[in-house]
Amino acid sequence: MDLRFTAEERAFRAEVRDFIEANLPPETRQRMIEGRVPTKAQTVAWQRILNARGWAVPDWPEEHGGTGWTAVQRYIFREELQQTPAPQPLGFNTNMIGPIIIAYGTEAQKQHFLPRIRNIDDWWCQGFSEPGAGSDLASLKTRAVRDGDHYVVDGQKTWTTYAQHADWIFCLVRTNPQAVKRQEGISFLLIDMRSPGITVRPIITIDGGHEVNEVFFDNVRVPVSNLVGEENRGWDCAKLLLGHERTGAARVGVSKERLRRLKFMAGEATENGRPLIEQQRIREKIVGIEVELKALEMTVLRVLAGGRRAGESRQADPASSILKLRGSEIAQSITELMMEVAGPYGLAAPGDADAEGSNAPELMPDWARSAAPLYFNWRKLSIFGGTNEIQRQIMAKAFMGL
Amino acid sequence: MDFDLTEEQRLLQSNLRRLLADHYGFNRRANYQAEAPGWSRAMWGRYAELGLLGLPFAEADGGFGGGPVETMLVAEALGEVLALEPWLSTVVLGGGLLRHGGDAALRQRMVPAIAAGEALLAFAQAEPQSRYSLSDITTTARRDGDGWVLEGRKSVVLHGDTADWLLVTARCAGARHDRGGIGVFLLRGDAPGVLRQGYSMVDGQRGAEITLSAARAEAVLGEAEDGLALVERVVDEAMAALAAEAVGTMSALHAMTLDYLKTRKQFGAPIGSFQVLQHRASDMMVALEQARSMAMYATMMLDEPAAARRAALSAVKVQIGRSARLIGQQAVQMHGGIGIATEYAAGHAFKRLAAIDTTFGDADHHLRALAAEVSTAA
Ligand SMILES: Cc1cc2nc3c(=O)[nH]c(=O)nc-3n(C[C@H](O)[C@H](O)[C@H](O)COP(=O)(O)OP(=O)(O)OC[C@H]3O[C@@H](n4cnc5c(N)ncnc54)[C@H](O)[C@@H]3O)c2cc1C
């Protein structure tokens, strides 16, 4: 057993870091340091820089633009992006629809979509959840009825992240309402967001941001050639996402970067004329989180090493749940502490962290601005991608025989 | 010991709840918040009619002679609907400074206007550097003829943007952290030299940054050079009111969550049938009842000597902060996605609870204050 990174892996990390330092636009980085989401233009521009370097989709097979890196290299790459911080590759494109088309798409779909996905020529969003189908995704009701060369889609998706930016949406739709097992009547469709009959309505979250949407489908005609995999076998495509990039949910690099920011904030905030970072209790709280994060990081590395030996398994695995649970809880505890450090100024922070020229008083310190919005927004981490209750349920049922 | 309300107190509570039920539904609240000044002047008028605004003042001054219990009942009811009006800043903070620090002439001049809903007050205490310290004051007050002139910057002033009157802490003597040398001054909100920048805070309440340049005070409350004890007393009263408000918000949020657990179905069953959520709802109820007990304890301790009162209120604030965090976070979690959507009430209650924790010191701040007093003797 040797848990250290090899010399090659360390050299690789240096190469990635140098590239990011040299190529990431400073405004993008600054915006992210302040705890704000990069703009669409910033995300796209950065993805194109990575694509030009051949690093757009490290996880894909080499024939489709992947890098051929080991799991550890891919982890290092992602961690470097996260802790710079730089925009991470748009997950809907690179981690979701790309791998699904690679696994289940037709040759024509691969030819057309994959290069555009890599370069974000098309911005994709994920149309799975519905008002009545959250944790119980298989109860989804949006219907697609075959009509000649088209499906006609009717229904509603919700919580659709960045549908307002999207050119395309990949959807789970019900094609066989009679199927005995609900999962067996579902198909996977690619839908052009410009299709007549699609309406996007924003959902504003409690931090004031516009990140999620409702998407309505009213008689939307979708060419049959946009079906991925077989009709009524769409659940297989969806399941692929469960096993994919299972170490990503740990968000170790993001938490490291946020901890760095937290310490910076605790150096700026003062009480009785002294920086908060000098207070023993704040220091203990920060270190307490750092210990948790170190344990998580080592767990991630164990998973990666296991994957390297056994070949990449795509099956669900208790590790995914452990990493998602701890990753979300640690990230949330950092935002709680940021809120605490910001103190009264955390309250004054304007509701909309992204509103340029907002009503924030000029004299309000920048470091305090995003504490409350981030604390509010990151409650989502234990809700999306399978709630933390569902994760615990999966562990108990599937891996512990309870 | 008697935890029962008097007939009059019950009547006050039910009248106020009825008023709020009629006029403070979730959508109404959103409308009040969206339109200037960010809360409802019509509601303010109704509070005045109901007698809320003059409630804690002595009858001799034009008030109705209510005590801490009445204030608790009002705060709790306002908390249940996340009321946005400047009740805390006008009646509890500004009003408290007047009650305990104003001379009879000033009280008789101000109280009738407050009770009638015609005077809004704000307490301009915090400064950019002060965090939760009440004595870290750099704003100065200098004698000028028979009056005072103030200079400095006040920060995160609750409802400071619309207040007709500002009650400002300023240093007349001593060094920055000294307990002595602090006075409380009454200024007109629109006095020359008062610059106010209003904004809406993360929980929808209004705040303001205030710059004072040679702004002239109308009056001094209490001793010009010895006002800190007055400030501490009034802040403790405000924390008691905040505790009760938080209890109202927590109980509404708990009820909302129970409702959701019973109606939201996944996997063919109400999610409230899942045991893990049942246990979570029970933990929320425990936290709520502990908080409620401490809100009552707060009212009981307000008239005790300063040291005992301050320790008690710190303890109250610790429990309120802890309960509020648990209930707020779990309510959002059990609502799933809609817990963080502005279109639903739960997220707003969660935010208000987070803000209450931060107002006048969060749970950790008060824990440290209590820890500093631990000794082997007691
Ligand atoms: C910010 C954000 C972005 C999102 N982006 C997308 C997106 O781009 N595309 C998309 O398709 N979806 C997206 N989602 C939806 C997300 O996947 C769902 O919110 C999630 O699956 C939970 O569903 P729900 O919100 O309906 O909650 P519900 O499923 O109604 O859950 C409510 C509560 O009940 C609990 N619960 C449910 N079932 C059980 C059980 N069996 N045992 C114990 N507890 C249970 C849950 O854990 C939760 O606490 C997003 C959500 C958020 C918040």
Image (cartoon, coloured by chain):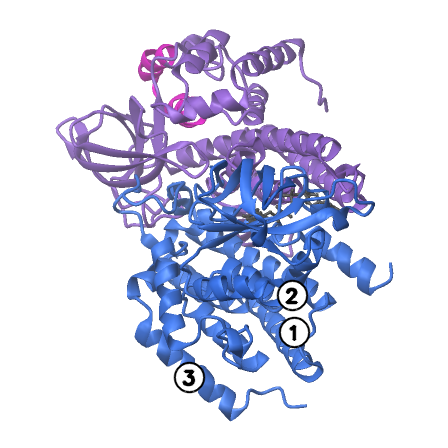
Q: Amino acid at mark 1?
A: Thr
In whole angstroms, how far apart are the C-alphas of marks 3 and 1?
23 Å
Residue at x-position 63% and y-position 77%: A304
Give the quarter of the image for residue B90. top left
Nearer to us: label 3 or label 1: 3
> Please, which chain is the residue tagged with disc 3 on?
A
Q: Nearer the viewer, residue B253 or A19?
A: A19
The chain containing the residue under callout 1 comes to A
Residue at horizontal 42%, vertical 79%?
A16
Pointers 3 and 1 in contact (C-beta within 8 Å): no
Per the model, the C-alpha gap separating discs 3 and 2 is 26 Å
Mark 2: which secondary structure?
helix
Residue A323: numbered disc: 2
Instruction: Specify whether tag 2 is near ligand 1 (CB below 8 Å).
Output: no
Tint applied to chain A in the drawing: blue
Give the mark nearer the N terminus: 3 vs 1. 3
Q: Secondary structure at mark 3?
A: helix
Q: Position of residue A220 (x, y in %)?
A: 54, 39
Part of the protein shown in magenta: B88-113
Q: Earlier in the sequence, mark 3 or mark 2?
A: 3
**Disc number for residue A14:** 3
Q: Which residue is mark 1?
A: A299
- Horizontal and vertical percent position of residue A321: 69, 62
- In this rendering, the answer to whether B329 lies above or below A90 is above
Chain B appears what colour? purple
